[in-house]
Image (spheres, rainbow, N blue to C red):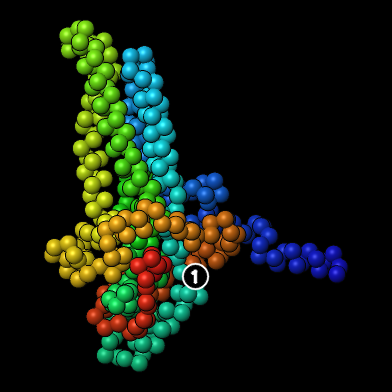
Amino acid sequence: MTSEAIGRRSSEDPIAPSQTLKRAWQEWPGNNAICCNGRIIIAKKYYVLLLTIFLILATATLFFIFDAPYIISEINIVLPILAGLLLIFVVSALLHASLMDPGILPRATPDEYNYWYQIEKAALANEPDRRRFSTNLGQMQITSRVVRVNGKELNLKWCYTCKMYRPPRASHCSLCNNCIDQFDHHCPWIGNCVGKRNYRYFYVFLVSVTVLTAYIMTLGIIHVLLLSQTDSLLGAMRTTPGTCIEIIICFFSIWSIIGLSGYHTHLICFAITTNEDIKASWAPVTNRKDGPNPFSRGSCCANFCGTVCGPRYPSVLKLQDFVEEATTETVYGSAPISRGSASVGSPTNLDEVAVSPQEEQQE
């Protein structure tokens, strides 16, 4: 093989980087800040996350400066050590929930989008009574698809931004501009969406920060009460003003944290997301409009263990791959199908999908 042929072959290699190739994360269309070569994904508006980290670290710092020395000398060194370990656990859970892919679904490729476009075009041509828009290119109706999950029919909605049918429980986040698999909600306090891949870390963070807040507040109160035995309560508060600030912060924070922890424990036990709970989607909770939840594993214990202790799902994004600039513009550019009213009453296709409770997230 000649050197000219070798050079031509290397220039045509789609894997070899060149001036026309970029990493997929560099061309990402969503409202995300991506760094470390696609390994860290966070919302661009992450300032509230910095406030969350500041409040946690500031409260813990006050504890270790004003309370820990007294507790070590007068009670036991183990108590501050436990507080330190709990703090590390809380920060670790927070960073896991904040900096990882929450379950973003990649947008349709040109071939995938073209496939659905041709199907809709043919359907409207064969059934003129369903035509609701003009015959100009781009003015056509998107119909829904239906899948069956554990005997229950669910509509797959078309996403006009990502140009695809969203799987069950997925939803498009308007803040991140991405479709999120098993979308729960967008949480500004962690600076990320909460979805299929990071929900367990979000829940663990809520529970652990509740325990940490209660633990620090309790030790702070004990510190002040022990000092008040040799002095007045006001004098004890003057002796350790940092403890008073710490107790105030914990007192006003713990109620909302306890409420969130209890609420998400309830959701996990019934296998319901926040998004589904707001829409009142499933039974057995009263007044659910669509009957029994097909994603439930059958018991509260099974639902809880499956969510918190189950395997972590791999990311479906390939942000480190090389892509051509022209390709990314085609995939993420404007589409010939315009936004219109989706027909959810008469699906054009029915896929029979038998889903076991353990595999329900795969849908």
Q: Position of residue 243 (x, y in %)?
A: 27, 19
Which residue of the protein is positioned furthest toward the top in this rendering? 230
**Can you tell which quarter of the image residue 147 is in?**
bottom left
Q: Position of residue 113 (x, y in %)?
A: 45, 74
Reading the image, the residue beneath label 1 is: 109
Q: Position of residue 313 (x, y in %)?
A: 45, 59
Residue 50 against residue 170 in the figure, above or below: above
- Is 267 left, or right, of 107 in this rendering? left
Residue 31 visible somewhere in the drawing: no
- Is 176 left, or right, of 284 in this rendering? right
**Can you tell which quarter of the image residue 278 is in?**
bottom left
Residue 188 visible somewhere in the drawing: yes
Which residue of the protein is positioned furthest toward the right in this rendering? 2
Identified by mark 1, the residue type is: Thr
Instruction: Residue at 43%, 45% (x, y): give it.
Output: 96
Secondary structure state at the residue bearing disc 1: loop
Question: Quadrant of the image for the N terminus?
Answer: bottom right
Residue 96 against residue 158 in the figure, above or below: above
Residue 134 against residue 259 in the figure, above or below: below
Front residue of 272 and 325: 272
Instruction: Residue at 66%, 65% (x, y): give it.
Output: 14
- Packing grade of label 1 (10 A; few <14, some 14-19, many >=20) is some
Residue 80 against residue 254 in the figure, above or below: above
Q: Position of residue 200 (x, y in %)?
A: 37, 51
Front residue of 226 and 280: 226
Which residue of the protein is positioned furthest toward the left in this rendering? 287
**Can you tell which quarter of the image residue 166 is in?**
bottom left
- Is 358 left, or right, of 282 in this rendering? right
Front residue of 142 and 357: 357
Instruction: Residue at 32%, 27% (x, y): give it.
Output: 59
Question: Quadrant of the image for the C terminus?
Answer: bottom left
Instruction: Residue at 56%, 49% (x, y): give it.
Output: 37
